[in-house]
Image: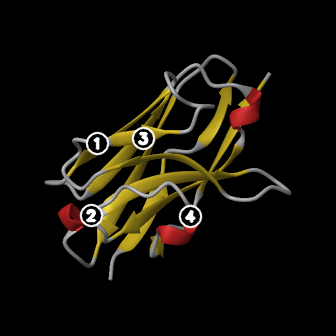
Amino acid sequence: QVQLVESGGGVVQAGGSLRLSCAASGSTFSRYTMGWFQQAPGKEREFVGAISWRGGTTYYSDSVKGRFTISRDNAKNTVYLQMNSLKPEDTAVYYCAADGSVVVPRHRSAYDYWGQGTQVTVSS
C-alpha cells in the first residue's frame, strides 16, 4: 500500500502559478504511475495528468495542456504538479493518485490509492 499527502494549494490570482506536491510513503514509490485529478464543486473528479513510474511518459487533459507540468522525484518519493497561467475554471480540489500498473491510465477508476486533496482557488 501507499499513503499520499498533497500540499501546496492556496488562493492565487488568474494568470498566477502554484506548485502542488504529493508525498508518498509506505511502499516503493518508483513502482507506481502517478496521476493528478481535480474536482470542482458539484462536478465529477476529472483527470488532469499522469506520469509513468520512471517519468518518461506524461499525459495531460486538453484543458491544462501547455499550462500544467507533472514531474516526479523518485529519490524524494514525491510527484509535483506545476500549474501556470491559472484560470478561474481551474478552481477545484486537486488529488494525487497512485496506480501499480505499467500503463498510464487516464480514468480515476484505474487508480488504487488517493490522497486527501488540496484546495486550489483562482480568483478573477
SS of the residue at dot 4? helix
In the picture of the structure, the residue carrying the numbered disc 2 is 102
- Residue 116: give its label: none
Quarter occupied by residue 99: bottom left
- Residue 108: give its label: 4
C-alpha distance separating marks 1 and 4: 18 Å
Disc nearer the start of the sequence (1/4)? 1
Label 3 Cα crowd, 10 Å radius (few <14 / some 14-19 / many 20+) = some
Looking at the image, is 96 positioned above or below residue 111? above
C-alpha distance separating marks 2 and 1: 11 Å
How many numbered marks have been drawn onto this rendered protein structure? 4
Looking at the image, is 20 positioned above or below residue 99? above
Q: Residue furthest bottom?
A: 1
In the picture of the structure, the residue carrying the numbered disc 3 is 59
SS of the residue at dot 2? loop
SS of the residue at dot 1? loop
**Residue 13 percent across, percent down from the top left:** 69, 22
Q: Report if the CB atoms under discs 3 and 2 are less than 8 Å apart.
A: no
Q: Looking at the rendering, in which quadrant would you find the N terminus?
A: bottom left
Residue at 52% across, 28% down: 65
Label 1 Cα crowd, 10 Å radius (few <14 / some 14-19 / many 20+) = some
Residue at 18% across, 50% down: 54
C-alpha distance separating marks 2 and 4: 16 Å
Q: Looking at the rendering, in which quadrant would you find the C terminus?
A: top right
